[in-house]
Structures are given as C-alpha cells and as structure tokens.
C-alpha cells in the first residue's frame, strides 16, 4: 500500500468545495481545506505508485477549481 499527501492550490474561493468533492473520491482518506501556500491537503492511498498516479491525474486533478497539485509519497525510514 502506498500513501501520500497531495498539496493542492485552487482558484480563489473554491477550497472548501474542492475539499468536499475530493473527499468523496475512492482512495482519498482525508481532505481538508487549510490556510497557507496550499488551499487543500489530501491524504490518499493506493495499491502501488502507478495506481496513486492514476488517482491524482485522472480523478483529483479533474476536479474543477484546482490549479496545481504536488504529490508527496509517505516513506518509512
């Protein structure tokens, strides 16, 4: 299982709606609107890195109002 944080920038005023919509996507375990350089932080999981990539590109980035994403896979050192 691969887990990651996905940092999202949105259009002005759309963070709450984006977080709400993303929280309903399968594989997303948490989605919160926040303040700072990013507007939404998502925690997601997938079976492998390829599936995580598909989740981000095909589903999360397809949500209207998103301008940029940064995916940060979790590593256990």
Image (tube, rainbow, N blue to C red):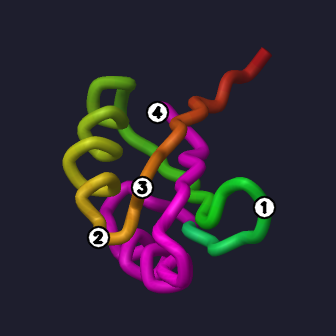
Question: Which label's residue is closer to the chain start, 2 or 1?
Answer: 1
Instruction: Name the residue at 53% across, 76% down.
Output: 12
Which residue is label 4 attached to? 1
Dot 4 or dot 3: first in sequence order is: 4
- The CA span between labels 4 and 3 is 27 Å
Q: How many other residues sit within 10 Å of disc 2, few (<14), some (14-19) or many (≥20)?
A: few
Magenta segment range? Answer: 1-30
Name the residue tied to disc 2: 64
Q: Is residue 7 left or right of residue 68?
A: right
Q: Secondary structure at mark 4?
A: loop
Q: Residues within 10 Å of mark 4 (few under 14, many from 20)?
A: few
Q: Would residue 8 appear left or right of 27 to someone viewing this image?
A: right
Residue named by callout 3: 67
Comparing labels 4 and 3, the label whose residue is closer to the camera: 3
The location of residue 66, given as percent across then percent down, is: 40, 61
In percent of width and height, residue 3 lies at 54, 38
| CA separation in Å, label 2 and label 3 | 9 Å
What count of labels does the image hold?
4
User: Dots 4 and 3: beta carbons under 8 Å?
Assistant: no
Please tell me in which quadrant of the rendered image residue 17 appears. bottom left
Residue drawn at x 48%, y 45% as measured from the top left: 69
User: Mark 3 vs mark 1: which is more N-terminal?
Assistant: 1
| CA distance separating discs 3 and 1 | 15 Å
Quadrant placement of the C terminus: top right
Q: Mark 2 to mark 4: distance in Å?
A: 28 Å
Residue drawn at x 36%, y 27% as measured from the top left: 48
Report the residue marked by disc 1.
36
Q: CA distance from mark 4 to mark 1?
A: 29 Å
């Amino acid at each position: 299982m691969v887990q990651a944080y996905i940092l999202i920038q949105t259009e002005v005023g759309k963070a709450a709606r984006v977080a709400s919509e993303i929280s309903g996507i399968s594989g997303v375990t948490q989605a919160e609107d926040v303040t700072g350089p990013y507007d939404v932080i998502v925690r997601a999981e997938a079976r492998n890195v390829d599936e995580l990539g598909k989740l981000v590109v095909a589903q999360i980035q397809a949500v209207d109002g998103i301008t940029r994403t940064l995916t940060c896979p979790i590593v256990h050192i």
